[in-house]
Image (cartoon, rainbow, N blue to C red):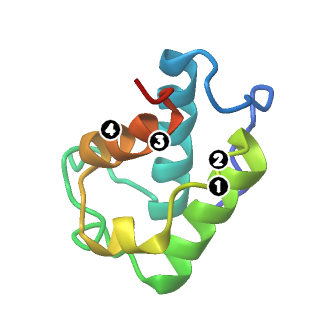
Amino acid sequence: MGTHPAPGGASAPGTDIPSVEEQITAIWREALDVPSGAEHATFFELGGQSITALLIIAWLEDELGITSVGVDQLFDDPDLDTFIRQVVVTLEPAA
């Protein structure tokens, strides 16, 4: 794994969703070292392991203040788009 992704300014939950999606993408790509052409691969297809899941969850908390996502969501083996939707739904205010 490379260096920690640039935060681009920490965002509080409930802020600009497109920016949050970009930051989640950066964290995912950095933690899983996503190769070109594997943008739609799932967590496990990209070699995700428990330590990688913990790293992603920690970065979400550190960079974005998101504490409502757990490793179990990564162990469901989502692709990036699915994981982003799972995270974003936790940021939306209850109706």
The foreground one among 24 and 70 is 70
Point out which mark residue 18 bears. none
Task: Classify mark 2: helix, strand or loop.
Answer: loop
Q: Is residue 37 left or right of residue 55?
A: left
Q: Residue at x 70, y 53 (%)?
A: 61
Single out the mark in the foreground, 2 or 3: 3
Dot placed on the residue nearer the N-terminal end, 1 or 3: 1
Q: Is residue 38 left or right of residue 32?
A: left
Which residue is identified by label 1? 67
The foreground one among 55 and 4 is 55
Task: Classify mark 4: helix, strand or loop.
Answer: helix
Dot placed on the residue nearer the N-terminal end, 4 or 1: 1
Q: Amino acid at mark 3?
A: Thr
Residue 83, image x and y in percent? Answer: 34, 49
Which residue is identified by label 4? 85
Which residue is identified by label 3? 90
Which residue is identified by label 2? 66
Q: Amino acid at mark 4?
A: Arg
Residue 78, image x and y in percent? Answer: 24, 58
Dot placed on the residue nearer the N-terminal end, 3 or 4: 4
Circles 2 and 3, Cβ within 8 Å, touching? The answer is: yes
Q: Is residue 47 left or right of residue 30?
A: left
**What whole-number distance in Å separates the C-alpha atoms at marks 3 and 4?**
9 Å
Q: Residue at x 74, y 38 (%)?
A: 6
**What whole-number distance in Å separates the C-alpha atoms at marks 1 and 3?**
9 Å
Dot placed on the residue nearer the N-terminal end, 2 or 3: 2
Residue 70, image x and y in percent? Answer: 50, 67
Q: Residue at x 44, y 44 (%)?
A: 87
Circles 1 and 3, Cβ within 8 Å, touching? The answer is: no
Q: Amino acid at mark 2?
A: Ile
Asked if one can make out residue 1 in the rendered structure from this viewpoint, the answer is no
